[in-house]
Image: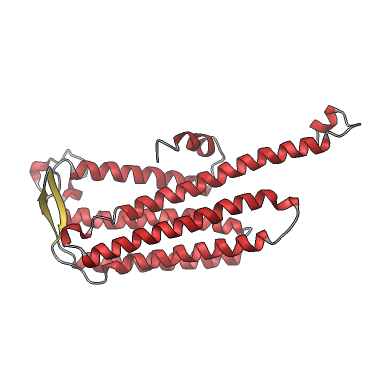
C-alpha cells in the first residue's frame, strides 16, 4: 500500500495544506511502517529471548524490547496506539461532516476517551497475567504465551464499539444530506458518498479482523493465538489512511469540475473573457 499510493500521498498530503488530519496521517503511516520494520528486525534476527541477553549486544536496536515479555507488552501498546491514531483520523472526519458542531465534538471525545481508557485498562490487567516464552521455530525464535488469559479478547470490544459509533454517525449524516436538493450540495454529496462507502467498508473489514483475532485467541493452540493480532493495527491504519486519500482526491476532482462549470456558465454571449476571468 505504501508504494502503490505514494504518488497520491505526495500530491494530496505533502503538497497540500498541513492540518491535524495531515499530521495524524503521517504519524499513522510511518509509525506503522517503522513497526513492521522493527518486528522484522527482531523476529528474523534471532533476537527474542526469555530474558535479557548480553550476548545480543547493547549496541543493537532497543535490546531491552527483545525480551519476550517486554516485546509482548510493547506489541500490545503499539496495537492500541495505531488503532487510536486511525480512529482519531475518522473522528476528525466525522466532526467535519457535522459542520464542526461542538456538541458532536464533545460526544466524540467522550466516546473516544472511554474506548481508549477501557482498552488500556483491559490491556494492563491482561499483561500482568500473561506469561510469554521464546519458542524455537524454523529459522529463529518466536514469542509464544505459555497460558491463555481469560478475557483478553475484551481488549477489542471498546475499539469496535467506537468504530460502530463513528460509522453510524456517518451513515446518519449522509442520509440527511442526500435528502437535500439543489446543485449547491453536489460536491458535498460526492464527498459524503466516498465517506459513507469507506466508513462501511472500514467497519466491515475491521469487524472481520477483530472476530478472527478473538476466535484465534479463544480457540486455537497457544502457538497460533497471537498470529492474527498484527493484522488489526495494520488494516486499521491502512484503511484510515485510504479514507483521507480518497476524500482529498474526490474533493480535488469535484473542485476542478465545479470550476469548469462556473467558467462555462459565465462565458455567455456579451460577456468578454476579461469579465469571465474575474468571476
Q: Nearer the viewer, residue 239 or 27?
A: 239
Q: Furthest residue to the left?
A: 55
Residue 50, by quadrant, is bottom left
Q: Is residue 191 above or below residue 260?
A: below
Q: Is residue 77 rendered to the left or right of residue 132?
A: right
Report the number of numbered marks.
0
Q: Residue at x 61, y 40 (%)?
A: 252
Residue 57 location in percent, x, y? 12, 40
Q: Furthest residue to the top?
A: 273
Q: Is residue 76 rendered to the left or right of residue 191?
A: left
Q: Is residue 114 rendered to the left or right of residue 215?
A: right
Q: Nearer the viewer, residue 245 or 189?
A: 189
Q: Is residue 9 rendered to the left or right of residue 81?
A: right
Q: Let me know if residue 209 appears in the view.
A: yes
Residue 191 location in percent, x, y? 60, 50
Residue 276, by quadrant, is top right
Q: Residue at x 29, y 44 (%)?
A: 36
Q: The N terminus is located in which quarter?
A: top left
Q: Nearer the viewer, residue 65 or 185?
A: 185
Q: The C terminus is located in which quarter?
A: top right
Q: Is residue 42 above or below residue 274?
A: below
Residue 146 location in percent, x, y? 13, 63
Q: Residue at x 73, y 36 (%)?
A: 260
Amino acid at each position: 500500500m505504501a508504494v502503490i499510493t505514494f504518488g497520491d500521498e505526495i500530491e494530496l498530503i505533502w503538497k497540500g495544506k498541513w492540518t491535524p488530519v495531515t499530521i495524524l496521517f503521517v504519524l499513522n503511516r510511518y509509525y506503522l511502517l517503522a513497526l513492521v520494520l522493527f518486528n522484522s528486525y527482531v523476529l528474523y534476527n534471532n533476537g527474542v529471548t526469555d530474558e535479557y541477553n548480553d550476548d545480543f549486544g547493547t549496541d543493537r536496536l532497543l535490546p531491552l524490547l527483545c525480551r519476550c515479555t517486554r516485546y509482548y507488552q510493547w506489541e500490545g501498546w503499539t496495537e492500541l496506539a495505531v488503532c487510536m491514531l486511525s480512529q482519531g483520523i475518522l473522528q476528525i472526519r466525522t466532526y467535519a461532516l457535522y459542520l464542526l458542531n461542538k456538541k458532536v465534538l464533545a460526544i466524540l471525545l467522550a466516546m473516544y476517551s472511554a474506548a481508549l481508557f477501557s482498552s488500556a485498562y483491559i490491556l494492563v490487567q491482561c499483561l500482568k497475567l500473561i506469561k510469554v516464552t521464546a519458542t524455537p521455530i524454523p529459522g529463529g525464535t518466536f514469542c509464544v504465551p505459555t497460558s491463555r488469559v481469560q478475557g483478553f479478547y475484551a481488549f477489542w470490544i471498546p475499539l469496535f464499539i467506537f468504530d460502530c459509533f463513528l460509522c453510524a454517525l456517518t451513515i446518519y449524516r449522509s442520509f440527511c444530506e442526500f435528502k437535500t436538493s439543489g446543485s449547491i450540495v453536489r460536491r458535498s454529496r460526492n464527498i459524503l458518498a466516498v465517506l459513507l462507502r469507506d466508513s462501511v467498508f472500514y467497519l466491515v473489514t475491521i469487524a472481520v479482523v477483530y472476530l478472527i483475532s478473538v476466535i484465534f485467541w479463544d480457540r486455537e493452540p497457544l502457538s497460533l493465538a497471537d498470529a492474527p493480532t498484527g493484522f488489526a493495527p495494520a488494516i486499521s491504519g491502512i484503511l484510515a489512511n485510504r479514507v483521507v486519500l480518497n476524500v482529498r482526491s474526490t474533493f480535488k476532482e469535484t473542485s476542478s469540475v465545479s470550476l469548469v462549470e462556473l467558467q462555462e456558465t459565465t462565458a455567455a454571449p456579451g460577456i468578454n473573457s476579461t469579465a469571465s476571468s474575474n468571476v
